[in-house]
Amino acid sequence: MKYILSIINVFIFLITIQCRGPKPNNNSDQDAFSLSAALNADEEGYDIILTVDYNKITVDDIIVFGIVYCDQEQVNLEELLVNEDNFIEIEKTEELHYGFPFYACQVDTFSKTISYRAYYKYLDNEETKIIYSNSLLEVFLYELAKADDSNYSKYIASYVESKIIFNIYITVDFQKHKASTTNEDYQIEIETDYIDIFITITPRKDYYFNEEVSLYINEKEVDLKDATISKEKIFYICPEPNWTKPY
């Protein structure tokens, strides 16, 4: 009797598995597409190319392929999701490549890093669901231009390079905790907790810092090894000279 019950239980289990059907392999599906960027000088912009590997897709009834984008300096992969106005979609065909145009780019985008993430939507029992890629593509138009020799590329390079800040010169009064500069391309903020002094430097609009920028305080170059540096901000910490260590 126990033997018969065991056979019945196995049979019921197998039927349950068949009724449920295969589930999407999210890892495979997330790796099923990749993004690349190509400059389009004629249209004064660029194309984002989404390439699909259909062999890795485990779901049926795909509706659209799309990309979501963001121009913030630092982007968290898991937070870059479809919102109201940050995406473009193309209906699914049997093509391997889908092009998303970003043309007539304005000069304020030349020095911005824009992040892109691919996705596709599919139907699951008439419910629309979405699967995102597990990687980002970061596009810096200036970098695309440097690999091209068109007049448009030269224009981009010339414009951006005129906005790059290579050296920063500031004067700091450590007694009064004040900072100043004669350069109008960046601004300075200074704070202290009376143990350390915190100096934040930000470029004005359309300017940005070179990756290997140099900082001079009171005409002396300082070591930026431990500073936080990005295109849009430098955060530097130095000891408070007025602080006396207790014994």
Image (spheres, grey):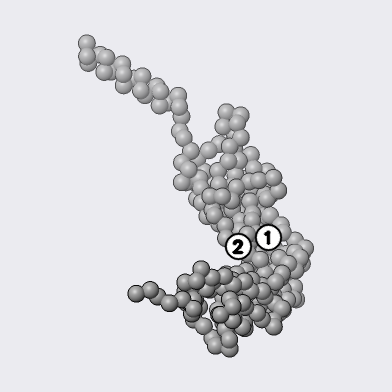
Mark pair 2, 1: CA separation: 21 Å
Badge 2: few (under 14), some or many (20 or more) residues near its Cα, within 10 Å? Answer: few
Amino acid carrying mark 2 in the image: Glu
Q: Residue furthest bottom?
A: 219
SS under mark 1? strand
Q: In this view, does 204 lie above or below 219?
A: above
Of the pair 210 and 181, the residue shown nearer to us: 181
Residue at 40%, 22% (x, y): give it. 15
Determine whether, in the image, residue 241 is placed left or right of residue 215.
Answer: left
- Amino acid identity at mark 1: Asp
- Residue 62, image x and y in percent? 60, 39
Q: Which of 245 and 23 is in front in this view?
A: 245
Query: In x, y percent, where is residue 209?
Result: 62, 75
Left or right: 106 in relation to 57:
right
In this figure, which residue is indicated by the disc labeled 1? 47
Q: Is residue 123 above or below residue 26?
A: above
Is residue 175 or residue 105 the one in the foreground? 175
Q: Quadrant of residue 178?
A: bottom right
Q: Give the farthest residue toward the top.
A: 1
Q: Can residue 55 be seen in this view?
A: no
State the image coordinates of residue 41 (x, y, percent, origin top left): 74, 68
- Quarter holding the C terminus is bottom left
Q: Residue 94 at what x, y percent from top left?
A: 62, 45
Identity of the residue drawn at 59% across and 78% down: 176
Whether label 2 touches label 1, CB < 8 Å: no
Q: Quadrant of residue 125?
A: top right
Secondary structure at numbered mark 2: loop
> Looking at the image, which residue is at 67% across and 69% down?
111
Instruction: Check disc 1: other Cα within 10 Å, few if <14, some if 14-19, many if 20+.
Output: some
Which residue is identified by label 2?
73
